[in-house]
Image (cartoon, rainbow, N blue to C red):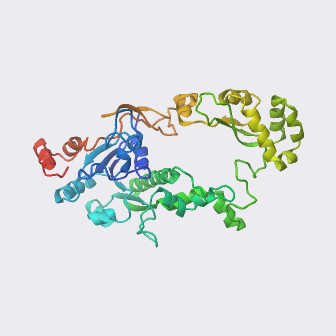
Amino acid sequence: MDKALANFRICDFTGQLAGAGATKWLSAFGAEVIRIEDPVRQGRWDILRGMEPYKPGQSGAEFGGAFNNHNTDKLGITLNLRTERGKEILTELVKISDAVTENFAAGVLKKWGFDYPRLQAIKPDIVYVSNCGFGHEGPYHRYKTWGPIVQAVSGLTFTSALPEQPPAGWGYSYMDHTGGYYMAMAIMLALLHRQQTGEGQWVDLACTEAAVTLNGPALLNWTVNQKPTRQTIQPSSNRSQFAPMAPHGIYPCKDIDGAGDHWIAISCRHQQDWKLLAAFINKPWTQPYDDTAYRLEHQDSLDEEMTRWCSGFDKFQLQEKLRTLPIPVAVVHKPRERIEKDPATAQFGLWPTVQHSAMGEVRVDGQPVHLSKTDWQMNRGAPLLGEHNHQVLSGLLGMDDAEIAQLQQDGVI
């Protein structure tokens, strides 16, 4: 199968998810992504390198599960940019690359002597894509960020709270996913412009501003109606105001494996859905709720009844029964269930297996899209530290074995 991005080479400094997740898209579609790391700091540019989850019996900088997940099919080299020889080698790599990508704090590449004017001097049509917390301009550009900070500044933390409780936040860093997606789009847009015009450019991405887009209706409600988020009249659950629906929630089910925490989502969009559900339940308690207005007014008691009823069922069996009615229903998947029990997973190829040089076979996130002509592929796990030094320095830059050995002895790689 053809690889859509096989003609592109990326000189890549990205890390974590907000950056590495972006260039993962490119490598999956065939781009040659050369990931550069520091040989002195042994993987500490990207803290995910040595972080759990690990496979049993494995740990350390070569075995981080999240790092492997975000860096499939990339080439990995080490390069000490504190040395003049390291900077010379980076210069040669830039000359043969289409884009330089990074998500350091603002100004890091400038401190190393490789800001956009310098990159442009090396290769006039280079595409430079930076992704940092607040971008390189504006009053916050000097500030560094991390997941909870981005979440707070973007407004997401405030949107999540129960009544009379402090903001709870969203837990996992969805802002990193969003930043990665925007960065992948930005890289491709700049490369497309370069193909059409021959011009490179600097793409300055602010991950915090990308996260703002996740606020969606909350921003629209203020813009149009001047209504603040978390009003007392708003539901503090999964209930639906627009359009009004009841029942519309997440309900506990039978503990089928001793692990607990089994749930199912059920929605009745209108009176017909409720009639189908009530007939299936076939219990006297449903009768007072035959009127839509009554259900909406008495959602607390309705949810209590739904909780008692759902608690008697295996969630998967109940899902299949309600699907035949049909009304909107879905089990609340745990990660293992989503990967191993849902038939759509295998059919769509959402978690392919790759071969990692140290871990062996490992499953990773696939891409949630398929192209009929130029689909993505994932075969190789993330690179070990400096795993492809010889391949890149010899194959692309023409160095011989003696020169590469001397670079290692001198601490350049």
* Nearer to us in this view, 333 or 72: 333
Taking 408 as reference, is 101 left or right?
Answer: right
The reply to whether residue 18 is in sight is yes
* Nearer to us in this view, 6 or 164: 164
Q: Within the image, what quadrant is residue 27 found in?
A: top left
Taking 102 as reference, is 40 left or right?
Answer: left
Taking 46 as reference, is 396 left or right?
Answer: left
Residue 217 lies, with reference to residue 48, above or below; the image says: below
Which residue is at a point 82% across and 37% down the rendered structure image?
274
The reply to whether residue 29 is in sight is no
Image location of residue 9, percent across then percent down: 33, 48
* Nearer to us in this view, 203 or 240: 240
Which quadrant: the N terminus?
Answer: top left
Residue that lies at the very extreme toward the bottom in this rendered image = 139
Q: Within the image, what quadrant is residue 309 found in?
A: top right
Which residue is at a point 80% across and 37% down the rendered structure image?
273
Which residue is at a point 36% across and 57% down the rendered structure image?
127
Taking 335 as reference, is 246 left or right?
Answer: right
Image location of residue 94, percent across then percent down: 27, 55
Which residue is at a point 65% across and 28% down the rendered structure image?
316
Image location of residue 149, percent across then percent down: 49, 61
Image location of residue 395, percent across then percent down: 21, 42
